Image (cartoon, rainbow, N blue to C red):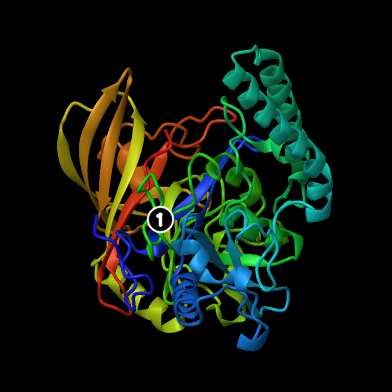
Amino acid sequence: MKKKERFSSGILLPARKPQEFRSGGLCARCGTMHYFPGSDEAHREALLLMEELKDRQRIDLHRDEATADPRFSTDYLFGEARGQMFGVMVCRDANGCKQVLRAFSCQYNGEWEVEGWVGPLFNVAAFQELTVDVERRIKELGREIEARETAGTDAQPLKQERRGLSRQLMKEIHALYQLTNFRGETRPIADVFLGTNGIPTGAGDCCAPKLLIHAAKHNLTPLGIAEFYWGEENRSQTREHGRFYPACQDKCAPILGFLLCGLETGINILYRDESILVVEKPAGFLAVPGRGPEMADCVESRVKKILGPDCPNQPAVHRLDMDTSGIMLLAVTAAAHRALSQQFADRQVEKKYIAVVEGIVKEESGTIELPFRLDPDNRPYQVYDPVQGKMGTSHWRRLSVEGNRTRIEFSPLTGRTHQLRLHAAHSNGLGCPIVGDRLYGARKEGNRMLLHATELSFTHPTTGKNMNFSSPAPF
């Protein structure tokens, strides 16, 4: 690979947009996969940081040239040590004000703490006190082992002593790594890390864990993250100067699920920019508020907390039934809401749902057209009414037969209340209710309805670009 200019004026474009990177993992505490996205705003802040690093060629950015510390020169990143990851997180504080956090992975030229950067997960003084004597002894043993092997004498007892010291030291070091999540829970990394091969060296030292824990401890709401590599390409050639990357899988993913737990629990953000927000709504969670304070918690209310005072009063552009999971689109601005609502009204938005229905559907595909309306005496139940009902239209195709059930892909052309549930259950439709439908089928206690909004395509209200999102059915 051709070597890059050390401080090139150009910054490499990522293979994917940084806001499309999703970092996350499984939280063993609640059994949920939690994700946190990149964002346009975090991407812009990261580009600003890149420019500062390129122009000033050091990371002690709070100092002037006269007092700059030579240890923090970016020469270090282009030397024998090679480059490392940098991260930027955009947050909102309790007063609704924007804050930008910055972090570097691991140490920088032997230093854990640099002014203006989020520090490590442990107390540095305690870390040094714990390690200095043991590391000195480990190095002494290394020299003694080398001498014995050179002399042809037995070095095995010394190797066993060194191995034992190293293992005990790592156990005590891991006890210093205290992880705090957005539920306010703090646990040592050894209690949180998910994996069967032990905790790898450097776990907890990456940018994402540093930034998330700092935000959780300081009552900050993260809005987006961007991570990039700066410096000489790493030896394994998996990191390239000026490129964006998601959080790593071996060190970060096993702890990110715990760290993200409690951060706007209930919705995973798939995408966010200055105009739109795309989320995954779980089954059993309201899309918009219902009547009464006990029905106030919903996707809309949580999104409004994220977006702050400038958020439209009703950001949801469309709705999903409480029992339906999947992709949901919200607007960040009133203008975006108007434009997207018009697309839905003009049927310019393409939607696909996955459902599992009771019984075997023999036909391979078809179109269902049924008029129905609300039953005012049995809200929110909808009834078939060829006279006063509003027409609902859905295309469908059979994906597979699974025992006594059938997996169906629905493509609704209209967006009537309970449309797909009625189209599945009614005798003039498929005649097979969706599994778990408590209104139009049979539902056992504790089971969810097997209906998931899996694809959504629309035109971006600001850029005019075609936007496509997908979410695999969790059943």
Q: Is residue 122 above or below residue 444?
A: below
Give the total number of marks visible in the rendering. Answer: 1
Amino acid type of disc 1? Thr
Q: Residues within 10 Å of mark 1 (few under 14, many from 20)?
A: some
Using the rendered image of the protein, determine whether residue 50 is visible from the camera's viewpoint: yes
Q: Is residue 393 above or below residue 114?
A: above
Which residue is painted at 41% across and 51% down in the image?
234
Which residue is painted at 71% across and 19% down in the image?
158
The one nearer the camera, 302 or 13, is 13
Which residue is painted at 51% across and 69% down in the image?
74
Q: Is residue 22 left or right of residue 404?
A: right
Which residue is painted at 34% across and 46% down in the image?
420
Q: Is residue 409 above or below residue 385?
A: above
The one nearer the camera, 89 or 12, is 12
Image spot of residue 462 (x, y percent) = 33, 80
Q: Is residue 254 left or right of residue 245?
A: right
Image spot of residue 40 (x, y percent) = 43, 72
Element class at badge 1: loop
Image spot of residue 156 (x, y percent) = 66, 14
Q: Is residue 345 left or right of residue 296?
A: left
Image spot of residue 475 (x, y percent) = 42, 33
Using the rendered image of the protein, determine whether residue 226 is visible from the camera's viewpoint: no
Quarter of the image holding residue 435? top left
Quarter of the image holding residue 304? bottom right
Q: Is residue 420 above or below residue 417?
A: above
Judging by the rendered image, the residue that carries numbered circle 1 is 417
